Image (cartoon, helix red, strand yellow):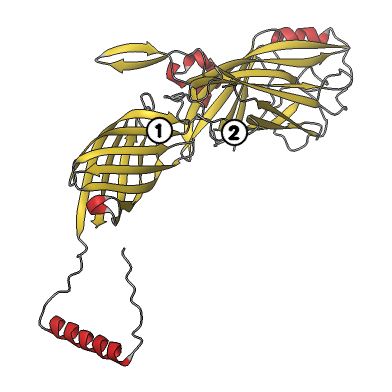
Amino acid sequence: MSEASAQRPVRARRTASRARTGAHRTRAPLASLIAALALSCTLGAASAQATQLTSISAGFSPLRLGAPTALSLGFDVRTPDGSLPSALTGIVFHYPADLGIGTSGLGLASCAPAKLSFAGPQACPANSIMGRGSALTEFQVSPEVSEENAEIALVAGPAQNGYLKLLISATGAYPVQARIVMSTLLLPGQLQIHVPLVPGLPEGPDVAVVRVNVTIGGNLTYYERAHGKRTAYRPQGILLPKRCPAGGFRFHASFSFLDGTHSQAQTVVKCPRG
Amino acid sequence: MRSMSRSAPTSGGALRRALLSGALAAAALSLGLQPAVAATRTTNVREEGSLRFASDEATQIVDEGRMSGTLPGSGRVYFSYNGSPNVSARFTIRTAGGTIDGTARCRLNNPNSPTPSFRGALAIVGGSGRYAHARGRGELFGVFHRRGYGLIVQAIGKLSY
């Protein structure tokens, strides 16, 4: 269902020979800055053997039944001993199917995945931006673990089989300059995302995603043409049902990792009072 | 459709009366006379409307507005779209002679467009007044305005009532 692509400015050779379990490897190189840094480092063996622990978060802003809202989703990955987690290879996110994402008015234009991959979300039509967020990744620079923040953009891609396609771009600037683009169909109540592997330093483990927070909707600016004029407006956002489901809005996620392990997490957004 | 039932004759006199009335009915039919039963009318219907957003229930949009065509009046459509291209609608057309209720299952095209179109089969399932026993089939065409939730709909089909 999902596609993935990765693009980096400079190519570097990688000689990793670890067995990989089912996931497609993206041979994206490191930036020249990090390649130079790698030469001065002592490289160590991967220490991602421990089972990954995951947790997810979800929230609506505002949390008002029957009103348009922004949906925030997030997850954390960690290991019991604090070591570098195994690289994430896939996520299946389940959310309440009666959330009005199809009627949100988000994604009124589409962006070509290649354009997003090469030029970033700023090259995409404003009306294709569906949300934003951030990610924290970790990679081994033995014996230490380094971190990198990435900006996430949620962008509407070309529809597939009549379903809206969500493109997820993650752009890191420092210390590794890189952008990966993932895609998923906006199925009712489900997002299935294949996460491409991003190589760390030569001989080291792949980059590990340890935290992601995204918001669908929220503070976005769209444009429409009325009476010959281009006018800015704020898209309505996801429509919350007027009735809260028994027990609240339930979210569930399944995570797959490169070491073959799987993890599940769930959370509930409680019904508002009154 | 109305259903009629009649109890069986229980005596010889009743049996004779039943046979007599049957013979009279057969004679009347042979003379070309029609029994006094309401005839079902079937008509081709073409209805169009540009509907405005009235309310919503997350994945369901409720639109209302004037309908023009064979049976002019006002319309209310409950349009359901949860992200799947298979959309559904319930509708009521309010005319001078009563209301007509129907359902439709359609396929939505170009979901990225600000105004995706949809098309599918509709069924008339009932109504009130003159159309209390309405039945029918046809096609529903439409455009969904994702920005303001308005609907442009066109229904074409056959209506029996």
Q: Residue at x 52, y 24 (%)?
A: A65
Circle 2 chain: A
**Which residue, given by chain and number where applicable, does mark 1 sit on?**
B61
Q: Which quarter of the picture shows residue B160?
A: bottom left
Frontmost of labels 1 and 2 is: 2
Circle 1 chain: B
Looking at the image, residue A42 sits to the left or right of residue B138; the answer is right
Mark 2 element type: loop
Looking at the image, the residue that sits furthest to the left is B31
In space, the residues marked 1 and 2 are separated at their CA atoms by 19 Å
Residue B23 place in picture, x, y as percent? 20, 88
> Looking at the image, is A23 positioned above or below residue B32?
above
Q: Residue at x 28, y 48 (%)?
A: B100
Mark 1 element type: strand
**Which residue, given by chain and number where applicable, does mark 2 sit on?**
A245
Residue B52 place in picture, x, y as percent? 30, 29
Q: Nearer the viewer, residue B3 or B14?
A: B14
